[in-house]
Image (spheres, grey):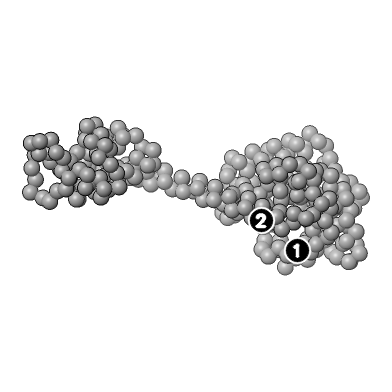
Amino acid sequence: MQKLNIPCIKTGEFAKLCGTNKRTLFHYDEIGLFSPAYTDEKGYRYYSENQCDVFFTITCLKELGMPLKEIKEYISHQSPAAIEELLEAQQIKVAAELEQLRRIQTVINTKLSLLHRARELRNITGLSPVFLETQENDQLLILSNPIFSDDHDQIFSALCEHISQCSRYHLNSGYPYGAMLPLSGLRTQDWETYGYFFTETCQPLEKIPPSAETYKKKAGTYAVVYLRGNYYESEGAFRKLLAYLEEHLLTPGEFIYKEAVLDELSAKEEEYLTRISICCKEY
């Protein structure tokens, strides 16, 4: 039995103060992790209010996934150096988890934005008319290895490597991968030659590894056609865009962009929605 000349409160009151329950406090005492300030002759436990901070720290470490045995080992040393080592290690872990949560939040926001855009275009069937849309800001794209071929094996290999790289370096911000087709090929009715695959990213340029090829898709006005259904049945969209450019005497950019708005994540194939666009005026 131990008595202290400091104000103490009973187990239930301390549990309420710390947002826990008596069972947890009893367990922590039994394993020697966190004991009451004193126990009276009848076995009743009493805690000092200044023990709240210690309990709170234990709770935080436990929520981070740290085993109670490991927490006990650090706390039993009661050394500033030991607890500093522990907290610095957990600081690194928390920073990594926060970064992961930020990436997940970005992906969720991106997917919601795409779904909202798809809802606005829900009345489109087949091919839409040509729209002129404004891209307010430059977009940063992660590019695949250059393809410039209609060879299926080469195209598929470039796509697989591109997806792998984006995953490896956490570059995907929730946008489905897209394709860039050279305008020069489309003008000769070559509908199958791909220039690059791309994935739009929200990562700042300084966080992108040097090994990743990037491309700045310029802000400006884009001529756009939406395709409902099979992503690959896009010849009609290409023809419609080329005819529109010629009719309105517009000077186009170097590439036509194909990118999903609604894909297999949320729709059946006949409901897929693809955006096919080309810049006709840079800002």
Q: Is residue 58 above or below residue 245?
A: above
Q: Is residue 49 visible?
A: yes
The answer to whether residue 22 is left or right of residue 231 is: left
The answer to whether residue 227 is left or right of residue 50 is: right
Q: Name which residue type carries label 2.
A: His
- Kind of element beneath mark 2: helix
Q: Name which residue type carries label 1.
A: Glu
At a point 88% along the width and 50% down the height, the residue shown is 236
**Quadrant of res 253:** bottom right
Q: Is residue 183 above or below residue 280?
A: above
Q: Position of residue 1 (x, y in %)?
A: 8, 36
Give the class, few, some or many, for how many residues have Cα within 10 Å of label 2's Cα (few <14, many ≥20): some
Which residue matches tag 2?
Answer: 116
The residue closer to the viewer here, 71 or 193, is 71
- Quarter of the image with the C terminus is bottom right
At a point 20% along the width and 43% down the height, the residue shown is 11
- Kind of element beneath mark 1: strand
The residue closer to the viewer here, 183 or 48, is 48
At a point 46% along the width and 48% down the height, the residue shown is 98
